Amino acid sequence: MEAIKSIFDFLTGLGSPVMLPIVIFILSLILGQKLSRAFISSLTVGVGFIGLGLVINLLFQALGPATDALVKSTGLQLNSLDVGWGVAAAIAFGTAVGSLVFIVALGVNLIMLLLNWTKTLNVDMWNYWHYAFTGSLVYLVSGGNLLLGLIAAAIHAAVALLIADWVAKDVQGFFKLPGISIPQGWAITSVPIIKIFNWIVEKIPGLRDVYWDSETLQKRLGIFGQPIIMGAILGLLFGILAYGINPAGMTFNEVLGKVLMLAVQMAAVMLLIPRIIAIFMEGLTPVSEAARTFMQKRFAGREFYVGLDSAILIGHPITIATGILLIPITLLLAAILPGNTTLPAADLAATAFFVCMVPPLTRGNFFRSVLYGILIMTMVLYISSAFAPLLTQIARDIGYAIPQGAVQITGLSGGNWIAWVLTTITRLIFGR
Amino acid sequence: MMTAPKTYTILVACGTAIATSTHVALKIKELLAERGLEVQTVQCRVQDLPGMTLNADVIVATAQVPFDVDIPVVDGIPFLTGFGVKEVVDKIEQILRQKS
């Protein structure tokens, strides 16, 4: 036992760019991947980590001082910068819990399939980061209890499978995608919320009859949502708010220079982070494929659903339109909600993900998608604000150089209630 | 006389331009290379398709494409589930071969 512990301490001490590739390499071999392919892909994951470190530094150099200035000049207490799902995922995978999440989540899935508790085989390895995120938060607030962190990740993974099964028929029917389900870690947490909202709305005369369908929608909404354009616009907006309102002795030219630079930097962040995440994905593809083949061979002849990323649902016109509408709505909510500290930024490019489960559960009702979207984003902002100090601490612990000071990091995509409930329970137990 | 093999461009679209499309792009390149077709892939979000479809030979999408596009669209979900991969690759190959 001592020996195992000292080996584990050594491995976690190596840092995530070394640790995670080792785990993925071993897992790939166990699942029957070829040696050369396993080696290249696990090394690619490590390279993804290094690349992400570079971009995170850019993010802080560019947006840290601007966030600081924004807080000072506008009086808005928005000091928790939304760094987006890419960075949140890298931080979650970077902890001790994160490096073991693939083994834990696959193990949970295998056991639940064997016991007939689920029909879903979750091959969407990238989105295991949500389970790692939950586990990492619990690991932190329990004072570094790895077992509790892994249990929390396992609970999130198990609940994801159960909810995915629960609404699989709705999703399959609505999107005409037979044989799939969506165990994505954030999407599943929205399902009970949508069901509750449906139940309430059905009780309200008038409101329950409002139905806007997709035919009434303008279909050419595309360009507004392009991440690079959105980044530039957000950068301009932040820049004007941060430096324009109260120039603090700077000349007009200096202010203009800072605002324009921030626009380009923000555009760079929005474009570069996803590109680097793609390297990560490239590394994970072979192991997720090996897992799929491995499981499909063992469960041949039984009815099961292949669990996929909620990204495959994003193309519905209602989802796209609602996602675009939610960008200004989320910024407005952030400004007016009392007690919110989250400054929405990087995940504004992913707002569609927060409502992707609404259309299949409301028979494609655009009205309810927008209404529920507003309520969901309110919850997301509050949870992200609550997680900001924790996520900032975790990022520091695993070696990202986040400057000490008022500015914190968070991610809208981490704002799910399962993580919040488990973290809160752990906090109560440990009195932290 | 041998002519240099034509390189085709495939636009791979998903919800983020990152997650599922990377997976699909890797598989497409691998499986079409086995059939002697050289392709380059460009990834994008389905939301961005209206402005992007100019130079591609075929679009492979893992999400619904709610726009009118003038390039053939093929469903990329089989690359994710592992069921029906051969049929999709057949279809892509057929579209590309017709182009040359």
Image (cartoon, coloured by chain):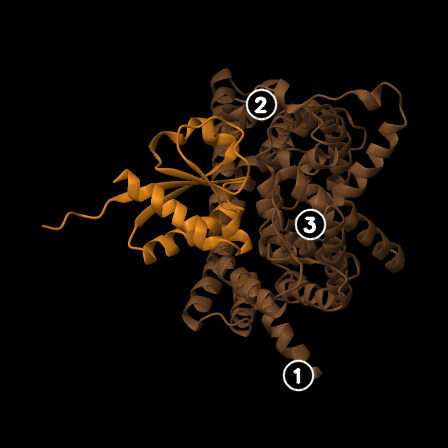
Chain colours: A brown, B orange
Tag 2: amino acid: Leu
Amino acid carrying mark 1 in the image: Ala
Query: Disc 1: which chain?
Result: A
User: How far is the residue under mark 2 from the one under mark 1?
Assistant: 55 Å
Point out residue A357 in the picture as x, y percentages from the top left corner.
70, 38
Quadrant including the C terminus of chain B: top left
* Res A266 visible: no
Task: Give left or right: position of A402 versus A191.
Answer: left
At x 83%, y 33%, the residue is: A197
Residue displayed at 13% across by 51% down: B2
Say which of A203 and A245 sits in front: A203
Q: Chain of mark 3?
A: A
Write down the residue under mark 1: A3
Both labels 3 and 2 in a single chain: yes
Tag 3 residue: A185
| Tags 2 and 1 touching, CB below 8 Å | no
Q: In the rendering, at what x and y percent does residue A193 appear? A: 80, 39
Q: What SS does tag 2 mark?
A: helix
Of mark 1 and mark 3, the one earlier in the sequence is 1
Q: Quadrant of residue A219?
A: top right
Against A273, residue B71 (above or below) is above
Front position in the image: B22 or A283: B22
**Residue A193 in the figure: left or right of residue A17:** right
Farthest residue, direction front: A301
To which residue does mark 2 refer? A237
Measuring from the top left, give residue A248's x and y in whole percent: 60, 22
Residue at image location 61% in from the left, 50% down from the top:
A308
